[in-house]
Every structure is written in C-alpha cells, then in structure tokens.
Image (spheres, grey):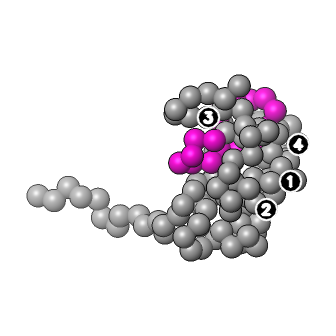
C-alpha cells in the first residue's frame, strides 16, 4: 500500500529566503506588513525575482525578538537584521542580496554558528 501524499508541492529554485516578521509586537503601526508588501516589487526591480540569485520571501507571525522591528532574517545565511526601514531594506538588497556582503551595522544576530554583538 502506498502512503505517499498525493500532489507534492513544488517550489522554484532560489538562492536566499527573506523572512519578514509581520507580528503585531514587531511594529506598532503596520510598518512590517508594509515592508513585506513592497518587498516583492523591490526584488523584481533588482532582478532578484528569477535566475541564479532569486530570492524567496515569506512573512512570519512572530520571531520572538519583539524589539527594534521590523525584523528581517536572510536564510540560509543566518543573518538577522533589525530596524529594517525602507532605506535599510534597500541597503540589504544592494549589499547583501545582490552583492553577497551582509550589512554589518544592521545585524543583531547570526546563527546557527554564533551570535553577533
């Protein structure tokens, strides 16, 4: 008897996965949700919606890091950013997602290999 689930999901290949906390304690006035809502278009403009550098984006309900939001995590790099304003998001896209160099000034944690200051 075959116990495999029918209709296995499919995902397109991607280089990095950006997770944005949109929980109510991350920001008080919906800034995190607005950041997530605009992220798809920003990735498209940067050419990160397809190809070898494609970035997948997902909103999450809570990272349990409820200070200095919006909070954004870039995987598989394990880089956690805080205070991700619109301008800081542009820096992250240009330097990290396109250039491969994390924006050190905005990082509050690195994992699983270790913490940042």
On the question of residue 59 being in view, the answer is: no
- Whether the magenta-drawn stretch holds residue 71 is answered as yes
In this view, 43 is above or below 3: below
Out of 76 and 18, give the one closest to the viewer: 76
**Are the residues tagged 3 and 2 within 8 Å (C-beta)?**
no
Which of discs 1 and 4 lies nearer the camera? The answer is 1
CA gap between label 4 and label 3 equals 27 Å
In this view, 103 is above or below 10: above
Residue 79 location in percent, x, y? Answer: 63, 41
Give the residue at mark 2: 38
Q: Earlier in the sequence, mark 3 or mark 2?
A: 2
Please tell me which residue is depicted at 59% across the width and 67% down the height of the picture.
54
Residue 97 location in percent, x, y? Answer: 67, 58
On the question of residue 29 being in view, the answer is: yes
Q: Residues within 10 Å of mark 1 (few under 14, many from 20)?
A: some
Out of 58 and 74, give the one closest to the viewer: 74
In this view, 61 is above or below 49: above
Give the residue at mark 1: 86
Q: Which mark is residue 110?
A: 3
CA gap between label 1 and label 4 equals 14 Å
Residue 45 location in percent, x, y? Answer: 76, 73
Quadrant of the rendered structure where residue 80 is? top right
CA gap between label 3 and label 1 equals 22 Å
Determine whether, in the image, residue 24 is placed left or right of residue 47: right
Which of discs 4 and 3 lies nearer the camera? The answer is 3
**Are the residues tagged 4 and 3 within 8 Å (C-beta)?**
no
Give the residue at mark 4: 29
State how many labels appear: 4
């Amino acid at each position: 008897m075959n116990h495999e689930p029918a209709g296995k999901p499919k995902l397109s290949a991607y280089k990095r996965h950006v997770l944005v906390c949109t929980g109510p304690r991350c920001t008080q006035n919906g800034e995190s949700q607005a950041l997530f809502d605009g992220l798809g278009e920003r990735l498209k403009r940067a050419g990160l919606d397809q190809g070898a550098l494609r970035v997948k984006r997902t909103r999450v309900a809570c990272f349990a890091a409820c200070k200095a939001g919006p909070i954004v995590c870039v995987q598989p790099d394990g880089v956690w950013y805080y205070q991700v304003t619109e301008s800081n998001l542009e820096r992250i896209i240009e330097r990290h997602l396109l250039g491969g160099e994390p924006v050190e000034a905005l990082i509050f944690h690195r994992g699983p290999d270790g913490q940042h200051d």
